[in-house]
Amino acid sequence: MSLTIIEGAWEGFFTYGPDYPIEYQSIKEVFTMELSVVDGIIKGTCVDSFIKKYFDEPAKVEGTLIDGVLSLIKKYPYFLGVDEYEQTYVDKALPSHEVHYRGQMKRKLFSSEYFVEGQWDISGSFLDEEGTARYYTDEGDWEMHRVK
């Protein structure tokens, strides 16, 4: 599978997994990606609802395509978090989390068009009220297809 199949404009969505509140689990967060290949590495940008609401530049995307498995890391321009009151906030003094997207490149039946299906995850840590380090991994599903 040639890397050139990943170049271009893509659109898709991601969903929230079972560790998220039930009201989030039915949401499909729509995104677009513009991808190219530079020295064998996939590079690009991503625009989703968080970018539109909280940032003035797209998220950066970088990854690989090996044996039909697409692996991408998405980084927002700055730290994007959720506080104890479930309010989303941006902190420009902190680096972005890395959101890891893994998916299988697939071809539509009786077509030459490709799409990707897979899972995403984000991991991190924080100190609780007692000063104990707490670790987490949140996850969900995603898919995307080439924009015609």
Image: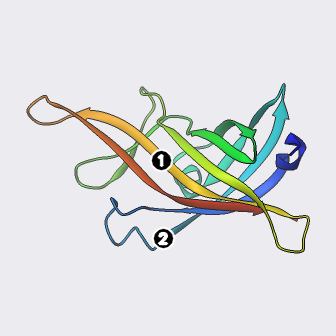
**Residue 112 place in picture, x, y as percent:** 91, 64
Residue sitting at 45 percent across and 62 percent down? 16
Structural crowding at the residue carrying mark 1, measured as other residues with C-alpha within 10 Å and reported as few (<14), some (14–19) or many (≥20): some
Colour scheme employed for the rendering of this structure: rainbow
Q: Which residue is mark 2?
A: 27
Q: Is residue 57 visible?
A: no
Whether 146 is drawn above or below 68: the answer is: below
Which sits in the foreground, 52 or 84?
84
In the current view of this chain or complex, which residue is farthest to the left? Answer: 130
Q: Earlier in the sequence, mark 1 or mark 2?
A: 2
**Residue 21 place in picture, x, y as percent:** 31, 65
For badge 2, the amino acid type reads: Ile
Q: Which mark, residue 121?
A: 1
In the current view of this chain or complex, which residue is farthest to the front? Answer: 67
**Structural distance between the alpha carbons of marks 1 and 2:** 16 Å
Q: Is residue 3 left or right of residue 121?
A: right
**Residue 148 place in picture, x, y as percent:** 88, 65
Q: Is residue 141 visible?
A: yes
For badge 1, the amino acid type reads: Asp
Which sits in the foreground, 110 or 80?
110
Q: Nearer the viewer, mark 1 or mark 2?
A: 1
